[in-house]
Each structure stands twice: as C-alpha cells, then as structure tokens.
Amino acid sequence: MEQDLEDFRAETRTWLEANAPPSVRDSEDAVVDAMMAGGSPGGDLDLWRRRIGEKGWGAPTWPAAYGGGGLSAGEARVLAEEMRRLGVANPIVGMGTSMFGPTLLEYGTEDQKKRHIPPIVRGELRWCQGYSEPGAGSDLAALSTKCEDAGDHWRINGQKIWTSGAQYADWCFCLVRTDPGRKHDGISFVLIDMHQSGVETRPIKLIAGSSPFCETFFTDARVEKNDMVGPLNGGWTIGKRLLQHERAGQGGGRLMGGGTPLPELAEAYIGRDADGRIDDVDLRVRMIANRIDAGAHGLTIQRAANEARGNQNPSAATSIMKNSGTRIGQDRAELTLEIMGHQGLGWQGEGFTSEELAAVRGWLSGKAWTIFGGSQEIQNNIISKRILGLPDPLGQSSR
Ligand SMILES: Cc1cc2nc3c(=O)[nH]c(=O)nc-3n(C[C@H](O)[C@H](O)[C@H](O)COP(=O)(O)OP(=O)(O)OC[C@H]3O[C@@H](n4cnc5c(N)ncnc54)[C@H](O)[C@@H]3O)c2cc1C
C-alpha cells in the first residue's frame, strides 16, 4: 500500500513537472485569486486549468465516470503534497467544486451528474448560489421565489440577493418555493441557466470597494424539467447539505491568513526591544494567542478529517469550524491593521504599499466572513441544537 502511494507520488511529480507552466508555480494565492475573479484569466493560467481539468485532478476524489480524478483519499493527499512542493495551486475553484458538485454527486440523477459534473471538473462553467432573498436570510425557509409547473418546463419568478458571482455565472443552483402552503416542505432545488432573457443581475458594491455579489431577478425564467434536483418539495434537505459543504470550505485555512506572517510585519513596523522581542508586550501576547488559535484550529480540522475517513460527507460540526476559522481570520486582519498603524488605513495613492492597501480592504471584507454561509449566531444555534442537543427556545428551524 505504502509502496503503491510512493509509486503514485513519483508519477504525480513527473506529471506536474511536465504540465504545470513555470509561471504558475510559487504563486498559489495569486492563482486562486485570479481564478475566483470574473472572466477568463487567459495565458498560462488557462493552459494550466485545461491540463489539470482534463486529467481530472481539479476534483481529485470525484468519480472518474464524471471526469473526476477517481483518486483514493491517500492518493489525493499525495497529490496535494506534491502540488504544495512545487508551489502550484488547483486552479479549478469556485462553488462548482466546493459546494454544488459534491451535493449533486450525492443527490443528482445519473443524467444530471453526466451533464453537469464534467464541465465543473474541467473548470469550464461557473456556478452561483441562489438562496438568500430580501425577506429570507437567516430564516432561509421563508423564501418566496416562485416555481410553477409550465407544462414542459418550470417557470421561475422572484428575486434573490447577495448572489456571489452571479454576474459571471453560467448556472445557478437555487432554492425555490413550489408549495406556498408549507414552509420547509414546500421548497425545491433547481438549476437555472443564467444565460437567458428571464435572468437579470445587478451588482452590489461592498464596503471594501469591490462588487462580488448581486441582486438577481427572475422573470418567467425557464428551468428544464430534468433540472430539478431531488423530488418536488424535497429541496430543503439538499439545500442544507450544500450549506454544510459551504461551511466546510469557509472553516478552512484560506480565510485565516496568507500574506506576510504577523511576526515579520511586526518586526518591520514596530521593531524589537533590547531583548530581541517585538517591542509591544500587549500586541505580542495577542499575536501569539492568534497563532495558537490558528494552530489548534488546523489540528482540529485535520483530526476531524482523519476521524471522518470512509464518511466523506460533512456534518453539523462544520458550523464549529466556520465560527472558529472566521473569528481567527478576523482577529488576524485586525492585528495586521494595528501593526501597520496609520499606514494600514490608506485607501489609495502612492503613500501606501500594495500590501498596506490590501490590508485595509481585507479587514473590511473580513466583516462578511461571519455573515455569509449563515451568520455566526445562526451557526451557534445549529451547534446548540444539532450537536449539543439543547432545546430551541424559538422553535425555529433556520438555515
Ligand atoms: C459577502 C457575502 C456573500 C454572500 N453570498 C451569498 C450567495 O452567494 N448566495 C446567497 O444565497 N447568499 C449569500 N449571502 C447572504 C448570506 O447568506 C446572508 O447575508 C446571511 O445568511 C444572513 O442573512 P441576512 O443578511 O438576511 O441577515 P438577517 O437574517 O436579517 O440577520 C440579521 C442579524 O440577526 C441575527 N439573527 C437572525 N436570526 C437569528 C436567530 N434566529 N438567532 C440569533 N440571531 C439571529 C443574524 O445573526 C444577524 O446578525 C452572502 C452574504 C455576504 C455578506
């Protein structure tokens, strides 16, 4: 077994060396950022996306029958290690691989998997999430976007909001109301082609200056009959599973940092005392606490992954990881600004380095981390009800 993995490591190393263009190496964050932004990145990044997509390694453990890598968990770990060694990131990112794909693999029909999974694996199509509405955020089951039977198709009318990446998306996985008389049991899960006249997106600007999300309007939008996932009025269970995949991603490492390590920043902006320590005792203590929290969080994620071997599906525990990971990330963003002092408060102009400008925008966008995917309070409700088994004082069943 170990020998098999070592053989696989050698093959993987050879393949990566031959196929990852030199310009995409040692730039993991830049690759992911470019792929998350709208439009096509072009050049070597597109070449890398095509090569790894055809190999199926953008979704390494998904079944080969749908274009995935078909790798075992051990092989996928080796692949990740070898990619890290070379400094290359997986360019096939977004809601298709992180949220929708795994959900469709669990709940979709054979036909739906054959049509929708391969383009996700190849990174050809972008997906967005049509859950929240002006009147349905935390109480998601209050959603009212209407889906009616129009004979040979489903007809959709209504409005979604905060739809991340809707302006670039090719498809939307969407929760819709199919029975106005029942709350949770009157919701279905449908797939909407965003390239049709019945769909309009209007970008909303975030406090950090970018427009990563939209208001999304459906006016007699068309959904094919074979693009309802699961049974009519059976969308709530599927929608909740997808949220677990979403939170599993949000509790991971990316929101917690990247960029220059805090001790290096502190040394540059604050300096050291006579004993060689960062010259601010209070800041030092909080930096160490953040480092310990991040380390403990990483180990907990690793332990949970080991314990879950054989059961690839996420659980309510993703709510713990989401709350913990996003809080650590927000603390880190706060510490970064504090270390930079007034240099960390620039919005634009030559008086600031690009890292300083990114710091203030990162701090502002970090405010969203404890809101999207279900707010921090809603995760606490889930933890208390589904993990600790405490009674629900409001008798609500939110997100
Ligand atoms: C950057 C960003 C990207 C997003 N992307 C998407 C997306 O792609 N698709 C999508 O569908 N949605 C998306 N969202 C929406 C997000 O899921 C909602 O904003 C979130 O679920 C909260 O809903 P709300 O904004 O309506 O707030 P509300 O539900 O109105 O909540 C307001 C406040 O009340 C608290 N609250 C509400 N109910 C309770 C309760 N029962 N117990 C305790 N406290 C409660 C909340 O915690 C919050 O602090 C995104 C949001 C952001 C910020």
Image (tube, grey):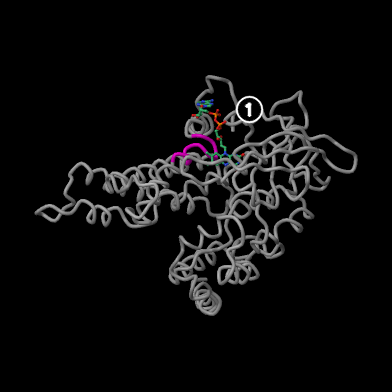
Residue at the extreme front: 350
Give the labeled residue for mark 1. 135
> Which residue is found at the position 57% from the left and 47% from the top?
245
Q: In the image, residue 199 lies at what x, y percent?
A: 74, 43
Secondary structure at badge 1 equals loop
Q: Nearer the viewer, residue 133 or 107?
A: 133
Q: Which residues are magenta?
A: 367-375
Asked if one can make out residue 249 in the rendered structure from this viewpoint, the answer is yes
Front residue of 115 and 218: 218
| Image spot of residue 198 (x, y percent) | 78, 42
Q: At x 51% / y 59%, what residue is drawn?
A: 32
Q: Quadrant of residue 144?
A: top right
Relative image position of residue 146 (x, y in whole percent): 76, 32
**Residue 371 magenta-drawn?**
yes
Q: Amino acid at mark 1?
A: Gly
> How many residues crowd around disc 1 within 10 Å: few (fewer than 14), some, or many (20 or more)?
some
Residue shown at 74% from the left, 38% from the top: 218
Task: Determine whether, in the image, residue 149 is placed left or right of residue 301.
Answer: right
- Ligand 1: image quarter: top right
Q: Residue furthest right?
A: 151
Find out if the beta carbon at label 1 lies less than 8 Å from the nearest ligand 1 atom: no
**Vertical comparison of 353 with 395: above or below:** below
What secondary structure predominates along the stretch shown in magenta?
Answer: loop
Q: Position of residue 339 (x, y in %)?
A: 27, 47
In this view, 379 is above or below 289: above
- Looking at the image, can residue 299 be seen? no
Q: Is residue 317 left or right of residue 53?
A: left
Identify the image quadrant of the C terminus: top right
Q: Quadrant of residue 18?
A: bottom right
Query: Which residue is at a point 77% across and 55% down the rendered structure image?
Result: 110
